[in-house]
Image (spheres, rainbow, N blue to C red):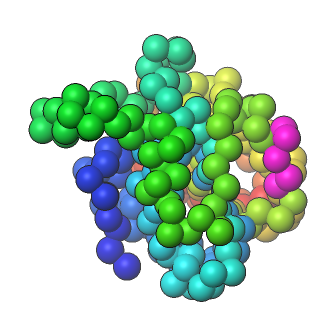
Amino acid sequence: MKFKYYFRKSSFKKDLNSANILISEIEKYKPINFLEVGVFQGVTSRNICEKLKTIHGDNFSFTGIDLFEDTSKDLDEKEMTSKHMKLSNPFKHLLFNIILRKDLNSLDSVNNLLKKFRENVKLLRGLSEIQLKKFDLENIDFVFLDGGHSYKTVKKDLDLIISKLKKDKIIICDDYDQANYGVKKAVDEIKEKVTEIKNLNARLVKIVT
């Protein structure tokens, strides 16, 4: 399966290797119930759903959590990575922001991108620490954690997820290698709470509960 970008911004845009590693891990573990924290414009979500469909047909579920809005004005810069910046391509900026007046970060836009999987997909709008407390994680098999990147946020998200997931489930955290953010520190501090932590490459780290 080839990772596609759907004419949208993605943190994997210049790192196809990491994107393919994530898809390979999904192929390896074949999760039925998937959770993504940090959906952004939905590019990774769409690729994940495409992969899950090739494995399970229509018998899978995907849940995504995000603020689904322009977060750059509302959150500390430590929460954000470069993928959250405004469209850098002048043509895309003109087409989507000026002509179409279409916010690719919006809930409606991401729902539209995932519409072929509408029976399988549930998108939750709000802060991860609030949504994770309300969401039943007991049946989740695989989590891709790519939400807020401050130490405080990643720590809270991981603690909530680990406390609710069953044993031997998979969490993959993005941007472990970014020194300006808190992903590495938060992940390193949970070693005693999980079965295994393994670097898939410099960027992606896998946690087995």
Q: Quadrant of residue 187?
A: top right
Q: Quarter of the image containing the C terminus? A: bottom right
Q: Is residue 165 left or right of residue 144?
A: right
In the rendered image, residue 135 lying in the magenta stretch gets the answer yes
Q: Is residue 127 left or right of residue 160?
A: left
Residue 118 can be seen in this image: yes
Q: Residue furthest front?
A: 100
In the rendered image, residue 181 lying in the magenta stretch gets the answer no
Please give the name of the residue rendered at 82% of the width and 47% of the height, measured from the top-left corner: 135
Q: Quarter of the image containing the N terminus? A: bottom left
Expressed as whole percent of the image width and height from the top left, the position of residue 24 reads 48, 74
Between residue 52 and residue 7, name the one nearer to us. Answer: 7
Q: Which residues are magenta?
A: 133-137
Secondary structure that dominates the magenta span: loop
Between residue 23 and residue 115, name the one nearer to us. Answer: 115
Please give the name of the residue rendered at 38% of the width and 40% of the height, measured from the top-left corner: 104
Q: Quadrant of residue 52?
A: bottom right
Examine the rendered structure and indicate whether residue 128 appears above or below residue 204.
above
Expressed as whole percent of the image width and height from the top left, the position of residue 31 reads 67, 74
Please give the name of the residue rendered at 67% of the width and 32% of the height, measured from the top-left corner: 126
Q: Is residue 174 left or right of residue 165?
A: left
